[in-house]
Image (cartoon, rainbow, N blue to C red):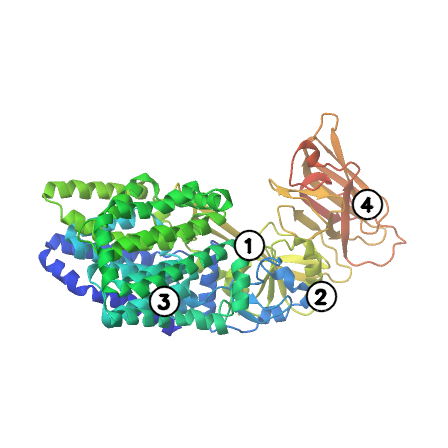
């Protein structure tokens, strides 16, 4: 773990050290206000990233996964440790605790490690573990949550240093405007995003080269950073390769070129080794047969493969011709002739292609562009365009123009990947993050030098002021996206709950997402009912009922607690409610503050003693606990009954009576349909209870008597529901509903009646 930590942090620090001569030279000529202003801005930005990381325990699927995996590694879990909790689970039930029982989704119980085989207990990391391993390397000095902010602080230092080295105090203003203009850096460098770390490595090379051309062993170190970036996320290869190519061909120096290539291979080795011997989240690309299947099975993989093949061919051609004096002279001549309009055309072609490309690919690109643009908007967009124009000015090296054009073309891949995804919040904007981080690093020095090179202090002041306005527009309009600590307090809250859960008892959550913070480390015997596994709850309940005879078992519900299960009364132990700030947004901006409420009630499953009676009290707000058969969707805190819907309830003694009370509502689909009769069959069969629901909200109640000659039964049984006239919403043009709805029930109470008056509340 500490090896990957050092392999990531040391190249960033070394590249910053490489910039020192240029930085010191500018430091000596700058005013004290400019010098210490740059240092203060870095201190404020780095401190903000480092001391206010997100606490995403319940937000962002990939972010949550990397975070849980890092914590598991820090606690000592290995790559292929068997899942001891799953091993204690009957093979027939294991799939019920997967995130999703879908052949297209890799099986996982804890979002951090993948299970081998349908009933297997052997595991591998769910995603490439480079980020979790590097983050876990901070232990015990710092928590893994500080790793990405640490990388962000180094990226921030590199960009500010590039701007200051090129333009002094004016450069600091420009770099600050570029950094603050969009919330991508401020948001993602405080989370657990692999793209952020990989992109920071690439951007660091770009920023360092802008201050001082890389050569010799330093170029090899830069190549290592570019190769290691691919291990954090494979899509970064489309940015890493052109940056490496620019370094290799910048001058006719075979030693430097060889150093970049060798460093890149060394940096990429962990990615190859981990894929070959540790895990293959999307398949083993090191084997040709598997690689072919990977490429042609997923649109994102096809897009990445196409980009890499095209880049490989162009790179091979460039390397073969790049050391020819005649070719180099021709390139420089073409560069002078093409500046600026030819380069502008090359950079604008991807935008034109995106707008005009027909079919599904074009639509996907445009969808990704619309979502991405929501995090840029016009003030900052104009600033970025102006900064990009400075790359084309006379005196800037060709490599910067080459990198800018390559970035424009590579952005198509990231827009495509973003377009494939449904916008589900700010965290999903991570797909375009590499383009943003590299773009800021690339533009900081040229734009700073252009501003510093202007004549007249007044003109510089006006331009600097305009740049700050453009860069600050989004900050003032939507500060939530910049300053919110997502899920703040969730880590401490989850750790407190974990201590109360203990490591001895088995705990089953009825909502998968709330089990995740406790599952990956294998210390807690926690299982979460998977997405779509509600119909299998009766089997799980039967297992819990059998376990409860010999050991302590808890049920954790994220809804209202249920009083009764199969042969069990559910005794409340404690409840925990967490309220955490989040950002509400479908794309990026506008971003509004919101709140995430995580509410868990922990119930001890206590077997009913012989002759013991207990009441059922069930609120139908989403939990499958206590329910049987098929139920309709939950809408506004009430669940639709269907033909055969059932609920676990107490069984009275022979000759005894049970009272059933149901609170619900009925909305007649037609004027002549004035009421709905809900018929309830008791566990022993016989006469049904008829509960009448007129239009609107109502409470209905009935009693049923168990025959004295009835056979022996358990303490609990299933009360089932039906209606004489099921409602099919499809006949009214409403889609997404079952065709056999009855009434909407909010609450059901079933009690065994005493010999006195009936219980009515």
Q: Residues within 10 Å of mark 1 (few under 14, many from 20)?
A: many
Note whether 734 is above or below 460 in the view shown: above
* Circle nearer the N terminus (4, 2): 2
Residue 546: assigned label: 2
Mark 1 to mark 4: distance in Å? Answer: 34 Å
Residue 704: assigned label: 4
**Residue 381 location (% of width, % of height):** 31, 42
Q: Residue at x 30, y 43 (%)?
A: 380
* Circle nearer the N terminus (3, 4): 3
User: Which residue position is annotated with label 3?
Assistant: 227
User: Which residue position is annotated with label 1?
Assistant: 600
* Circle nearer the N terminus (1, 4): 1
**Mark 3 secondary-structure assignment:** helix
Q: Residues within 10 Å of mark 3 (few under 14, many from 20)?
A: many
The answer to whether mark 2 and mark 3 are in CB contact below 8 A is no
Residue depth check, mark 1 versus mark 4: number of the one nearer the observer: 1
Left or right: 506, with 11 as reference point: right
**Residue 548 location (% of width, % of height):** 68, 65
Camera-side residue of 386 and 113: 386
* Circle nearer the N terminus (1, 2): 2
Residue 202 appears in which quarter of the rendering? bottom left
Q: Residue at x 64, y 62 (%)?
A: 95
Camera-side residue of 94 and 298: 298
The answer to whether mark 1 and mark 4 are in CB contact below 8 A is no
**Residue 549 location (% of width, % of height):** 70, 67
- Image quadrant holding the C terminus, namely top right
Mark 4 to mark 2: distance in Å? Answer: 29 Å
Mark 2 to mark 3: distance in Å? Answer: 54 Å
Q: How many marks?
A: 4
Residue 48 visible somewhere in the drawing: yes
């Amino acid at each position: 773990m500490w090896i990957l930590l050092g392999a990531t942090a040391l190249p960033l620090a070394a590249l910053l050290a490489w910039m020192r001569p240029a930085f010191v030279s500018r430091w000596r000529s700058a005013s004290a206000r400019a010098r210490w202003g740059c240092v203060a801005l870095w201190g404020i930005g780095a401190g903000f990233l480092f001391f206010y990381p997100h606490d995403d325990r319940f937000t962002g699927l990939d972010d949550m996964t990397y975070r849980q995996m890092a914590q598991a590694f820090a606690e000592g879990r290995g790559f292929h440790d068997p899942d001891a909790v799953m091993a204690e689970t009957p093979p027939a039930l294991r799939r019920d605790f997967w995130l999703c029982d879908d052949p297209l989704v890799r099986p996982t119980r804890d979002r951090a490690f993948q299970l081998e085989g349908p009933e297997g207990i052997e595991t591998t990391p769910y995603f490439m573990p480079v980020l979790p391993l590097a983050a876990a390397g901070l232990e015990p000095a710092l928590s893994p949550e500080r790793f990405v902010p640490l990388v962000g602080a180094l990226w921030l230092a590199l960009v500010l240093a590039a701007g200051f080295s090129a333009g002094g105090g004016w450069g600091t203003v420009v770099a600050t405007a570029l950094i603050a203009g969009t919330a991508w850096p401020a948001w993602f460098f405080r989370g657990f995003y692999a793209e952020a770390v990989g992109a920071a490595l690439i951007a660091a090379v770009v920023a360092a080269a802008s201050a001082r051309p890389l050569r010799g062993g330093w170029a090899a170190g830069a190549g290592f950073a570019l190769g290691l970036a691919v291990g954090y996320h494979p899509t970064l290869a489309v940015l890493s390769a052109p940056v490496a190519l620019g370094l290799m061909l910048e001058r006719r120096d075979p030693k430097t070129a060889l150093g970049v290539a060798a460093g890149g291979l060394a940096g990429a080795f962990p990615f190859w080794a981990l894929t070959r011997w540790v895990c293959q989240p999307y398949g083993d690309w090191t084997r040709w047969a598997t690689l072919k299947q990977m490429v042609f099975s997923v649109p994102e993989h096809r897009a990445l493969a196409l980009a890499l093949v095209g880049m490989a061919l162009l790179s091979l051609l460039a390397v073969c011709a790049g050391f020819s004096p005649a070719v180099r002279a021709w390139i420089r001549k073409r560069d002078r002739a093409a500046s600026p309009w030819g380069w502008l055309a090359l950079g604008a072609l991807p935008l034109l292609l995106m707008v005009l490309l027909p079919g599904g690919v074009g639509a996907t690109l445009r969808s990704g562009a619309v979502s991405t643009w929501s995090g840029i908007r016009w003030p900052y967009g104009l600033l970025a365009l102006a900064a990009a124009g400075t790359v084309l000015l006379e005196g800037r090296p060709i490599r910067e123009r080459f990198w800018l054009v390559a970035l424009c073309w590579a952005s198509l891949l990231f827009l495509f990947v973003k377009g494939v995804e449904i916008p589900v919040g700010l965290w999903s904007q991570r797909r375009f993050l590499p383009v943003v981080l590299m773009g800021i690093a690339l533009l900081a020095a040229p734009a700073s030098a252009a501003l510093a090179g202007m004549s007249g202090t007044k003109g510089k002041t006006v331009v600097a002021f305009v740049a700050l306005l453009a860069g600050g527009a989004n900050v003032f309009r939507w500060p939530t996206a910049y300053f919110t600590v997502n899920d703040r307090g969730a880590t401490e809250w989850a750790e407190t709950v974990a201590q109360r859960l203990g490591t001895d008892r088995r705990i089953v959550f009825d909502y998968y997402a709330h089990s995740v913070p406790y599952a990956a480390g294998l210390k807690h015997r926690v299982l979460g009912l998977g997405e779509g596994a509600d119909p299998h709850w009766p089997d799980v309940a039967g297992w819990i009922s059998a376990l409860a005879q010999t050991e302590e078992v808890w049920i954790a519900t994220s809804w209202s607690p249920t009083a009764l299960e199969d042969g069990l009364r559910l005794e409340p132990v404690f409840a925990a409610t967490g309220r955490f700030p989040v950002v509400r947004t479908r794309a990026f901006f506008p971003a509004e503050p919101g709140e995430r409420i995580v509410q868990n009630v922990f119930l001890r499953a206590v077997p009913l003693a012989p002759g013991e009676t207990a009441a059922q009290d069930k609120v139908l707000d989403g939990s499958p606990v206590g329910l049987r058969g098929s139920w309709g969707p939950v809408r506004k805190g009430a669940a639709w009954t269907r033909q055969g819907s059932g609920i676990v309830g107490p069984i009275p003694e022979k000759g005894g009576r049970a009272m059933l009370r149901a609170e619900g509502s009925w909305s007649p689909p037609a004027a002549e349909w004035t009421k709905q009769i809900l018929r309830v069959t008791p566990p022993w069969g016989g006469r049904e209870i008829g509960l009448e629901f007129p239009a609107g909200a109502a409470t209905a109640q009935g009693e049923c008597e168990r025959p004295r000659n009835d056979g022996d039964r358990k303490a609990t049984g299933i009360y089932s529901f039906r209606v004489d006239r099921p409602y099919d919403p499809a006949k009214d043009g409403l889609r997404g509903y079952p065709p056999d709805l009855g009434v909407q029930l909010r609450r059901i109470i079933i009690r065994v009646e005493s010999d006195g008056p009936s219980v009515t509340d």
